[in-house]
Amino acid sequence: MARYLVTSAIPYINGIKHLGNLVGSQLPSDVYARYLRGRGHEVMHICATDEHGSPAELAAQKAQKPVAEYCAEMHDVQAGLADGFRMNFDHFGRSSSPQNHELTQHFAAQLAKQGLIAEVEEHQIYSVTDGRFLPDRYVEGTCPNCGFDSARGDQCDNCTKQLDPTDLINPRSTISGATDLEVRATTHLHLKQSQLRSELSDWIEGKHDWPLLTTSIAKKWLNDGDGLQDRGITRDLDWGVPVPDLPGKVFYVWFDAPIAYIAATAEKFDDWERWWRTDKGADDVTYVQFMGKDNVPFHTLSFPATIIGSGEPWKLVDYIKSFNYLNYEGGQFSTSRGRGVFMDQALSVLPSDYWRWWLMSNVPETSDSQFTWENFQAGCNKDLADVLGNFVSRVTKFCRSKFGEEVPDGPLGETEQALVEELTRRVTLYEGHMQAMEFRKATAELRSIWVAGNEYLQEAAPWAVFKQDPEQAAGIIRLALNLCRFYAALSVPFIPDASAMLATSLNTNLDWPEDVAAALDTLKPGHAFTVPENLFAKITDEQREDWQERFQGR
Ligand SMILES: [Zn+2]
């Protein structure tokens, strides 16, 4: 038994995430954490909402709510959706928690003590009417490129040109509409990441087992152009972790968000340091992070710079599993155009197991992958309904009709011995893929394990054997009922609801089958069970067409 700390990239607070976000962070993280728990390891599984920054303030403004209230509400929405998808987080925290305020300020103070913080004078837009400096997105005006009259300070939404707030013609404050804006000097803090470049480089170079996607992105940021740059860690906002000694400023969201992994653990657990401080017990912890590729620079460089630069014995990540993008029907998911399936919509049309299975068997591991309704329908119908669901249904119903709802007694033969050997080999492969977080290979192997049961049943043909030799048919069915339990246990990481339902019907537990032969002899003759409800209904063509239409966007 080992100890694993598992974190999912934390979703930003302003709105509900789509399936592409889900499959790149929370879902694989949950699959892995569930697998580790199944194997008896001690696991701490953490996620949170990322709540600071100007997009949160602006979204709150749009919703006409105070930002703290908006974030509290959206946190509950996102935590509810995580529950709906059966994420078994030990805690789903908030980056706005008091624990994160304290830890973020602590890290900044430590970094300053180590000489890694610089005070830099910047020139920024100040609104006299509002009495404050305005971050990029708080300034709007006419685009110097296309003449669009509502271009934002960071970008023009009409022509997509990247802008600086001072580029805008007739700039105004988005807070008050004030036009009495002027450029003033102000002090910001920068993290001197460039001084940690060689240390970070040595650390990344030593990670031979990391996915190429992870290390290649890290090395690009370390080495391209002038190499790793110093970076501002403060902003002129009200909402955030206040910067001591710099009134009106808060820490930049990229700085405080990853610290929330630690803080979220501390929100819930008094003994959180045994997971996060190598001087307090975390030296035997394996720390694994899950994220989409856009988050890799922050987790391979910025957050490690904070950890290493602090000079304190904080736990550094041991493995970063990163993902490419999931696209939607030949294009991208789009929040603004309502294109694609978002987490709340997904659960409104089908239970989470369908989504979990399909997304993980099509996870964008080595390249971008694509969600299409045709593939989704075909994959769910074939794997879940035809292979797994059908097996369970045939076996339990046949048993009920011939032997009643209890496990019958009968002999096993050579066919069963061969099956045990095949499954032993396949389970070892499956475990290897799960441990290595190779999820496409893992789902393919699990599917093969389900198929092996169907092929066995086809070959053993208990319905035919029953006519000549009911006792032999009873032996086949006893093994097949044990296979149902075996499948439920192995499938927990991907389809936890179906597994739980099956365990309840079979009146058994979901202990991991450490020894296949023993696992297939768990349900003894006389053990009572009930025939489960149909595990997976097939997705019809009408449903598919309806959903295709509904989620195509504007
Ligand atoms: Zn423009």
Image (cartoon, rainbow, N blue to C red):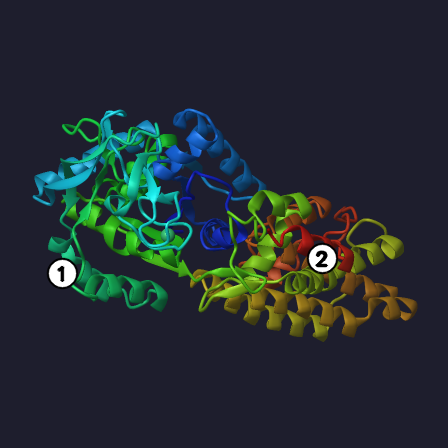
User: In the image, what residue occupies the spot 66% across and 43% down?
Assistant: 348
Above or below for 192 versus 53: below
Give the left or right position of residue 502, taking residue 180 as reference.
right
Please state which of residues 100 and 70 is positioned toward the viewer in this rendering: 70
Where does the image place residue 232, in percent across and percent down from the top left?
19, 44
Residue type at tag 2: Arg
**Position of residue 161 measured from the top left corner of the image (x, y, whole percent):** 34, 55
Q: Is residue 32 above or below residue 387?
A: above
Q: Secondary structure at mark 1?
A: helix
* Disc 1 target residue: 198
Residue 424: which quarter of the image? bottom right
Secondary structure at badge 2 equals helix
Image coords of residue 262 (percent x, y): 31, 39
> How would you rate the neighbour count of disc 1 (Cα within 10 Å): few for under 14, some for 14-19, many for 20 or more?
few
**Which residue is the site of mark 2?**
544
Q: Residues within 10 Å of mark 2 (few under 14, many from 20)?
A: some
